[in-house]
Every structure is written in C-alpha cells, then in structure tokens.
Image (cartoon, rainbow, N blue to C red):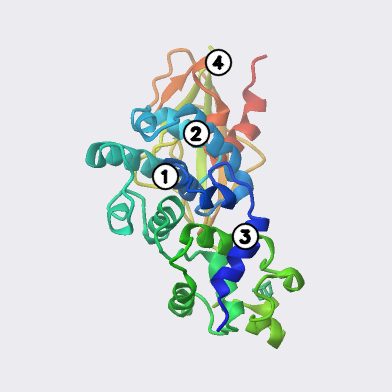
Amino acid sequence: MRDLSSELLAWYDVHAREMPWRVPPAERKAGVLPDPYAVWMSEVMLQQTTVAAVRDYHRKFLSFWPTVRDLAAAEDADVMAAWAGLGYYARARNLLKCARAVMADHGGVFPDNVEDLLTLPGVGPYTAAAVAAIAFDRSETVVDGNVERVMARLYDIHAPLPASKAELTVKAKELTPQNRPGDYAQAVMDLGATICTPRSPACGICPWRDPCAARVAGTAAELPKKTPKKKTPTRYGFVYVARRIDGAWLLETRPENGLLGGMLGWPGSDWGDDPKPDPPFEAEWAVLAEEARHTFTHFHLRLRIMTVRADADTQPMRGQFFLPDAFSPAALPTAMRKVFDLAHVTLRDD
Ligand code: SF4
C-alpha cells in the first residue's frame, strides 16, 4: 500500500514555504522545535487572514512582545492598536486573555496537548490541533479550508461543504502520521496553498498526482462542492466625526461585546436596515457626500458620515476628545479608518 504521508513529507522537505514562525524541515529533523508562543500567535492571526497579510503583523508582535509574559503584561490599548488593520478584533482580545491565562494557570508555559490547549480563551479545535501538532509534534489532525479541498480532491468526494466536513475530517485523520506530524500538518497546508489551489490546481507537479482520484476523474477544479451561500445583507449606520478647534478628535471605545469590540472608533448609531441618527452632541452636523463602505464576514456596511467643527467647550454625551498627538489613524480598525480617510479632508487644519 502507498504511504501517502511519507510521499507528501518528501515533497515538503524540498518545497516547504518559509515563514517567520516556522522551523524548516531539516532543522526539525535535527530536533529543533518552534517556539509555541510564536506558533500559537501565527495560528490566531492566520484565522480568516492570508499568510501575506500576517507576516508583518507577526514580526511586529514578536518584536513588541517577544514572550507570552511580555504580551500578558501589555496594555490592552497597545495590543488593540498594534492589531488594527488585521480585522476580526475578537481575536486580539482573545490573544490577550489567552496570554494572561497561560501566565496565570500554566506558569507561563504553553500546554503541549489538545485537551489543555482547548481550555485557553480563543483556542478552538483547529488552533489547539495546529499548536499541538506544529509546536509539540503531537499526532493531531489539522483541518482548515486548504485541507478540506485537498481531501475532497484526493478522494473525489462530491458531497458539498459544510455537510461533508465530517467525512473530509475522517479522511484527513486517516492520513495523519505518527512520524513528523508537525511537518505533515504544515505540508498539507502548503500543498493546498501552493499547488492544490482553489481554481487551477497544478496537478502536473503535485506529489499526490498518481493517487489523486479527482485528477484521474477530471473533476479536481470543481471540488470541493459547496452549498450555495445566502446573499450577503447590507447594513447601514451613521458615524459622527467631530474635530474641536484645538485639533482634537472625538472618539469612543466600542463596547467589548460587539463588532470591533474594544477598538477605538467614531461615535455612531446602531447598524441595521433603517438606523436612527444618534449624534454624540447637538450641533449643525454636515453630511458628507460619500459613504464609507466596508465588508465584514456576514454583511456589507455602509456608513453615512456626519462631520462638524466642535467648539472648545463642547461636552459630548459619549466618547472623549483626543488631541492629535494622542491619536493615530493607523490605530483605528479598517472600517473606521475609511471614515477618517473620507472625513478628515473637510476638517483639516486651515
Ligand atoms: S493531483 Fe491535483 S487535485 Fe489532486 S491533490 Fe494534487 S493538485 Fe490537488
């Protein structure tokens, strides 16, 4: 019988992608394992985000906070600001909670098995399996979109996702080796990201081209099948950009339990089908011709931007004024930065 995992590992030995948090296969074979802290951070950042986007953020976080102890002691606002632009901000809050739990409950040492990893905030089955396999060489199966696609093709499985997830996971588990499971987990991800890509798989140079059932059947490019998604809805809202005559901007920290929770943003209304204006103080607000548009996972957002020059004695009902040297637009989440980009022209210093 063919040893598919060994064939893939032989390919990985030559073609492994370089990542800042990764130990190359030759070094791993010599017994070097990666820093679990760096692996865990990479996995949290890579949820919903591409490797290309994550590289610089990972480097930045490791230079600001080289160890889990440093991160656990960081100011929340500094971590949220450093995360700005990476999206899905619940991950940043969980990053901090998790670092603090590792310090408080595990003496600053990351657990080395799935059961204990799963007790950490923000660590679900995928991240726990990835950290256990990659950082500790546990024989755990890591199943993400790349792995699902590769399994659907390797076994020519036509049942659509998400219903076929369980079947694809079983197949992935069957292939997970006892020998070099960390490298194997990364090898399947690399194969999915570089060769068995969504639209045009490069079957001619694939290490699994001979055993691949979909390649033989000519169905690779149409797999995995997916149950059609519902149309993404659009929500609307108002945002209020106020600048005081001394140059200060009115900002507020968004509620912890909501989208962009804990991040700095412009005061605004709720987001929905028919939002009601909700200014932070009474004034002659001017409406900007252009709306800010942003797309989150489950909806498109269109924000109507209201601007005003505020008097020196303005007392807002929400938020607080930040003088220019205490506020960096780069610290805003992307949706809010788009608002700034559109609004600041009308409120710039004369
Ligand atoms: S042969 Fe083609 S479809 Fe099959 S695993 Fe390789 S790249 Fe994917």
Residue placed under numbered mark 1 in the picture: 36
Task: Report the disc number at residue 247.
Answer: 4
Residue 107 appears in which quarter of the rendering?
top left
Between 94 and 327, the residue placed more toward the observer is 94
Secondary element under disc 2, as helix, strand or loop, is: helix
Marks 3 and 1, the one that precedes in the sequence: 3
Q: Residues within 10 Å of mark 2 (few under 14, many from 20)?
A: some
In the drawing, does residue 290 fall left or right of residue 315? right
**Amino acid type shown at disc 1:** Pro
Query: In this image, 112 relative to 174: left or right?
Result: left
Res. 330 in view: yes
* Residue beneath disc 2: 61
Label 3 SS: helix
Residues under labels 3 and 4: Cα distance?
55 Å
Q: Earlier in the sequence, mark 2 or mark 1?
A: 1
Residue 234 placed where, x, y %? 55, 58
The image quadrant where one finds the N terminus is bottom right
